[in-house]
Each structure stands twice: as structure tokens, then as C-alpha cells.
Image (cartoon, coloured by chain):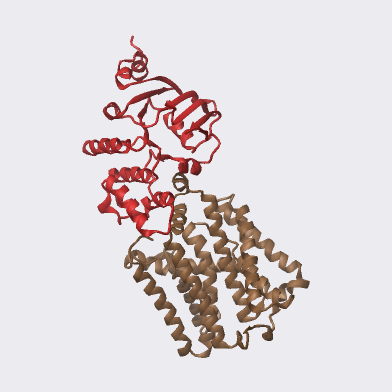
Chain colours: A brown, B red
Amino acid sequence: MSEASPAKAYALHLGVIVLLFVLSFLLPDYYHGLLARIMVLAVFAMGYNMLFGYVGLLSLGHAMFFGAGLYGAGLAIIQLGWSVPAAFAAGLACGAALALIIGLLALRTTGVAFMIVTMMFAQVFYLAILYFAAWTGGDQGQVVPQPARVLTFGATSLDLTNPTMRYMTALGLFSLVLLITLAVVRSSYGRVLVAIRENEERTRMLGYDTFSNKLAAVVVSGTICAASGAAYALLFGYVGSSFASVQYSILPLLWVLLGGAATTLGPLIGTLFMYYVIDLTSGYTSAYLLIVGIALILLVLFFPKGILGTIRQRWLGWLP
Amino acid sequence: MTPLLTTKGLSRSFGGLRAVDNVDFALMPGEIRAVIGPNGAGKTTFVSLISGRIQPSAGTIVFDGADITGLPTYVRVRRGIAYTFQITSVFANLSVYDNVALPVQLTLSDIRSKDALRTGVMSALERTGLADRAHMPAGQLSYGHQRLLEVAMGLALKPRLLILDEPTQGLADGEIDNFIELVRDIAKSATVLLIEHNMPVVMQLADRITVFNAGRILAEGTPEAIRENKAVQEAYLGTAP
């Protein structure tokens, strides 16, 4: 936020990226694949955090932005036969356009009404996917064929279905979004977003058009979530309506709360933590969701600011 | 000389109450104008209409030759009307530095320049004597310092008109003396509209005084003229038996 210790913050973030890179060569196959998936979903969480953590807008409809990226990229390949980069761009464009429209409409409301409006739009999006089953594959979803998931640059071709390639692509996207998030929250624009979260009326009285700033944040957030969805379709090859369901609107909220809202690395920690708790507990008992639930309750009771939020509050005040 | 700010027939009703009633008002560039009046006289409503926090029921507001009656708040701020709140509303969770950086970055032509930002913030903090507290969370400042931070935020906007809504409320005597110096300093570069209950402060600072009563302007003039004004004495002290 303030001037303090930018070098430390950048060193920490680069360190995390390097650590994830090194892990690629150390992890056994199963965890290697899981971590690739977690990094893609952490991008989704980072997009959500941009709006929820920094601007204080609680959306219950972000599955539609993830879904817009997922379907935008997936259908561009399946139905239109586009190349991987073009499909990824299509996913981003769908997410950005959807976010702009939803933002213009939903930002007329605040608080609980904003939650309900975003949730309703996401339901419309979900039902539209089911309704246009001939195109989207409905509740069955569709598989993005393996031969189409290859990036070609002239003579070299990169197969996104190869585990290492997939991991590195996921890491690339994750790193890019992480550094973008860090740059945004440290910028003067980030300061305005936090000011809106803290006191919108006061921010307006300092000469800021808070509506436009919030709209821009919705578009940035929606586009990041769409990037995650598009990458998911291209890397894991499945486009399904469950990813646009209400569950996928709640999950990023949980990940962010768990890791720490308004922290740059919190979304990764939260996503990672949730996945590993599910993974570990499901090995012991079929009632693993019960344990996850208890873990969440304990966290909310003892770490209401999330893992990183609490660490920042108690020990490391310089964490961005 | 043309006025910096004029209002014509400015009115605002809340239900049946005419909080501001048909007010014609003019403010010359460079002056320090105090607005006084009993509680409920409509002073805060009047400056809220000027700053755009509330919309008038009738009348027009002209600032620097342009009609600003219909403009949203943030545009008025950008044109040079800054408002400091009566109830302290600094961003408690942000550092003092960030509180002032928000208005400063609005005035910078190159918002990427960290040096220009730092210079602007520190100069506003030095003028208000808060420079050594730059990295404290604003919520941990004492009440008096939070009031000064409010003023620093207003100053940092480089306003042409600074509206101070009861700035000395709750300040200790020593703090008030510093405050008077600060307002005199501000008035070198901006017109000041001051709502104030503390009469010694008003008498020391104001070039002219406007007295509100029941939503209307009761009297206007130099501090001496207002002090002698019978109608003002009655409004404040009640009618003589």
C-alpha cells in the first residue's frame, strides 16, 4: 500500500514463483497435476479477491465470469475450430464484455442487493448454458479434443496436454496475474479502490468518480476470472456447466476468506489449503466435507482475517 | 471583481422543513468568510448544497462563472471546491500518508511519478504538522490530529475554495491557536468558507461574516458590524423583554 518495503514485497512474490517452479521437478505425478489445477483456480480466486478484497464488493456470481472464459475458449475450439491463442483471447473477451454489462447493471445496487443481483445474473448464465445444450453440451459438458490443445509457433509445437507443459503454462498464467495484482494494488488506482471500500462517500468528496472506478474493477476482476476459466478449458480439456453453477461462485469467496482477503498471496494459500484439506481428509473418511466444514469454522473463529490477513496483522505489516 | 461563488434563490426542503430558504449569497476570491448561526439554522445544509453532497430543491449555484448546480460532487471537487467534514471521516485503516496521497494523486499530471506524489503528500503533512506521523494508521491519531488530517486532505486538493465545517470542534485551546495560523496560511492561496461556532475564532479569522437563521441569511458584514447588529443579538440571545 504505502511506500514501505516494495523490494521485500517483490522478493517475496518472486520467491513464491520460483518455489512453484522448482516444485514442478520434485512433486510426484499426482500432486504435480493437482498443483497445476490449483494454480489455475488460484487465478480465479485472485480475480475474485480484486473485487471482494480490495473494493469490498461481495459478488455471489463470479462463476459466470469463470464460465464465460471456460465456454468462450472451449466453444471457440470445439465449434469454430480456432487455434489455442485465439480461443484464449476469445475467452478473455467474453469475460471482459460480460463483466462490463453486469457491472453497469449490478453496480446500481450495493450491499445485499449487489450480492443478490450478481447471483441472479449468474443463474441466468448457468440456465442459458443448459438451454443452449445443442451448442454447449448442456449438463453433460464437452471435451476439448486433445489434438486441438496444441500451441504451434512455426516449427515448434507445445502440447498443453503434456503434464510438464501444462504445469508451466499454469505457472506462467499464475505468475503473470500475481504480478499484475501486486502492481495494481500498489498503484494509485489500488489506493482509490481501497478508499472506496473504506468509505465511498468520502472518496467521492475527494474528487473520485467512484462508479467508474468500481466498474473498472469489475471488468478487471471478471477478465482475470475469465482468464482462469479459459486456461482451465485449454489445459484440462473439459467444458462443463457445473463450473458455472452457484457452487463455483461460493468457492472463490471461501478460498479468499481462508487465505486472507485483500492480500495478494491469500488466494493461492486459500485455494491450496482447501484442496489439500479435502485431499487429505477424503483419504480417511467419506465424511470429509464435515472435516472441511469444521476447519472453516475454526478458521473463521480464530483467524477472521484469513491465514495471510492474520499473519499481516500480527507479524508482517508490510505484506501487500 | 467578480465573485468566485454565487448562489441565487438556493433552497432545500426536507419534508415540510425549509432547511435552506431562498438564499442569495456571494463570495469574493481570496476572502475568509465565516458562516455562523444557531443550531439548525441551515449552515451545514447550505455548504452541502455547494459541495454537491445534496441536491437543491430550487435555485442555482455558480462557481467561477459556470453553473455547477447539476454537477456531481466529484466534478465540483475537480473544479476546485474542497470540503472537510464536520464529523471526522478520515480513512481510519489507511496510513496518514495514504489518506493524503488520495487527494494529491488527483492533482498530479503524471500519476506514475512516485517522487511527485511523495513531495505533494509531505508538503501537505508539513503544513499541518503531521509529517512525523505519516506512517501511522489514521485511526490511531488523536482527535485533534485527525481534524488536522482532514484539513491536510482538503489542502492537498489544491482547492480554490476550501469549505471547513466546524474545524475547531473538540480541539484544545493550544490546538486552536495553531489552527488559526493554519487557516491564515491556507487563505493565501485559497478562498475559505468557514462554518464555526467558536466566536473568538470567527472574530480573529473572518474578513466577513454571514449569519444564518431559520434557513435564511439574517445579516452579513464585517465582524465589527455583525457584533453590533441587533437582529443577530436577538437570534443568538433571544428577544429582549
Tell me where residue A90 appears, x and y as whole percent: 65, 70
Tell me where residue A202 appears, x and y as whole percent: 44, 46
Where residue A307 sits, quadrant-wise, is bottom left
A150 shown above or below B164: below
Which quarter of the image is occupied by the N terminus of chain B?
top left
Return the residue nearer the eye: A314 or A91.
Answer: A91
Return the residue nearer the eye: A316 or B217.
Answer: B217
Outermost residue to the front? B1
In this rendering, would B130 be left or right of A87?
Answer: left
Can residue A261 be seen by looking at this rendering? Answer: no
Where residue A263 sits, quadrant-wise, is bottom left
In this rendering, would A73 be left or right of A201?
Answer: right
Return the residue nearer the eye: A61 or B146.
Answer: B146
Which quarter of the image is occupied by the C terminus of chain B?
top left
A39 shown above or below A51: below
Can residue B105 be seen by looking at this rendering? Answer: yes
Q: Residue at x 61, y 60 (%)?
A: A99
Tell me where residue B221 appears, x and y as whole percent: 36, 20
In this rendering, would A271 be left or right of B139?
Answer: right
Outermost residue to the left? B174
Tell me where residue B189 appears, x and y as whole percent: 34, 38
B174 shown above or below A118: above
B227 shown above or below A74: above
